[in-house]
Amino acid sequence: MSKEAKLELDGKVYSLPTLTGSEGEKAVDVSTLRATTNYITIDDGYGNTGSCASKVTFIDGDQGILRYRGIPIEELAEKSTFVETAYLIIYGELPNAVELKRFSDLLGTHQFLHEDMKYHFEGFPTGAHPMAILSSMINAASCFDEGLMKWQWGKMKQFDVYVAKLISQVRTIAAYSYRKSHGLPLIYPKQNYKYTENFLHMLFSMPYEDFQLKPEVVKALDLIFLLHADHEQNCSTSTVRMVASSQANLFASCAAGVCALWGPLHGGANQAVLEMLADIHNSGDDGSKFITASKDKNSGKKLMGFGHRVYKNHDPRATIIKKACDDVLAKLHITDPLLDIAKKLEEAALKDSYFVERKLYPNVDFYSGIIMRAIGIPVEMFTVIFAIGRMPGWIANYKEIMDEPKSRIYRPRQIYTGKTVNHYVDLEARK
Ligand code: COA
């Protein structure tokens, strides 16, 4: 039997049920608190709030553990691919050979955008940020699909097709948004290329010459997608769930996730890391002056790529990606002064009491930017790559909330701290 928590308020004692997750995570269930006590809970930044029960991803931030559907991220990084992992995250099990082929075929069939969407791309100015284009175009894609326009919550017979469309088309839209923002001709996906190969092809080929795919580059980018594929209730995933709870369609909900991901404290951090390293390099600093500045709250500087709301020991994705970064740079024979600065910053921060006491360790964004720079991906595309990778996680969370018979619209409360009743004053009488 689960324990009960006791809450004493205004001289009365209330019993609150507790919940325990499959990994022993504990929660006090306050669902009935307002109805029984007229109090609500306040939790700035939601640091102590479980917004849902989920079966998708498990994180133990103190131990540095990340598992998708129970499988450790280290095993998936070593043995799986992004497409296979996407299936695992969305459908809950690793696919057998038939299921994997069907899923891959669906991705291939639905990778083309409606031709008329090209006119929408043309409306964006050269230099538009690809994240703005990405979120707009995912939403715009709804207008070209009758099923999305007439979305029936929980009753879409072809939900699998929409899943494949979104995973596949987000990659096509992402590549087009880069081509558009650089004024380059759009390149169509090829049927015989695998998921990540096709992305690189659409990004870098020219109508007169195909991009030469290097296996180490394909592998590194596929790994980056896989490592970003889900991360439980972060800012963008919670946004997707929030929008989904209103029963908005799958594309609209995930377009909202792209907007949430864009900020520098979330997915935008990988771009911010590279910009920070370039600034340090250009200023002639070896990183030591920057470390000092990042500890001073008045400097307006932070050590980007360090710290995490959940991981307080190490980010397991950072360990994997650091090794991949060393491997890919060695294979491509690249020496990068920014990587040298990154290593100095990491070494200095890990010994510095400011960072140690606050449990600030490198996160996944610290090294992913360096890999992407090494393989020629422009800095403004970094967060877009993160969005492509995160799509399976957003979809799995959407599916989870849609499949839950008792799901209801997300509607937090607030403590009002504004003026009490305050009457309307006519314009002439206002000071
Ligand atoms: N550089 C310098 N100081 C940092 C820091 C960083 N990257 N990250 C956190 N801190 C400091 C805070 O100023 C705060 O100091 P204080 O206790 O003296 O006030 C303390 O560490 C705790 O940080 P807090 O802001 O409460 O952590 P959070 O859980 O709210 O935020 C992040 C987590 C990720 C938003 C934050 O660490 C950050 O901004 N990191 C850089 C951006 C980044 O890499 N984001 C990608 C996340 S995957």
Image: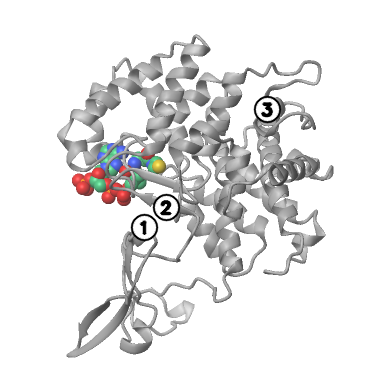
Question: Depth check: 381 or 387 in front?
Answer: 387
Q: Residue at x 47, y 81 (%)?
A: 426
Tell me the CA gap for discs 2 and 3: 30 Å
Percent x, y of residue 300: 30, 38
Q: Nearer the viewer, mark 3 or mark 1?
A: 1
Q: Quadrant of the N terminus?
A: bottom left
Residue type, mark 3 in image: Glu
Q: Callout 1: helix, strand or loop? A: loop
For marks 2 and 3, the one nearer the N-term is 2
Q: Which mark is residue 197?
A: 3
Q: Residue furthest right?
A: 115
Q: Nearer the viewer, mark 2 or mark 3?
A: 2
Q: Residue furthest top?
A: 333
Query: Is residue 198 positioned above or below 253 on the image?
Result: above
Tell me if mark 3 has few (under 14), some (14-19) or many (20+) residues whose alpha carbon lies within 10 angstroms of its own: many
Q: Residue at x 24, y 31 (%)?
A: 293
Tell me if mark 2 has few (under 14), some (14-19) or many (20+) residues whose alpha carbon lies within 10 angstroms of its own: many
For marks 1 and 2, the one nearer the N-term is 1
Q: Quadrant of the C terminus?
A: bottom left
Q: Residue at x 76, y 30 (%)?
A: 186
Residue linked to disc 2: 58
Q: Which mark is residue 346?
A: none
The answer to whether mark 1 and mark 2 are in CB contact below 8 A is yes
Percent x, y of residue 26: 31, 65
The answer to whether mark 2 and mark 3 are in CB contact below 8 A is no
Residue type, mark 2 in image: Phe
Residue linked to disc 1: 23
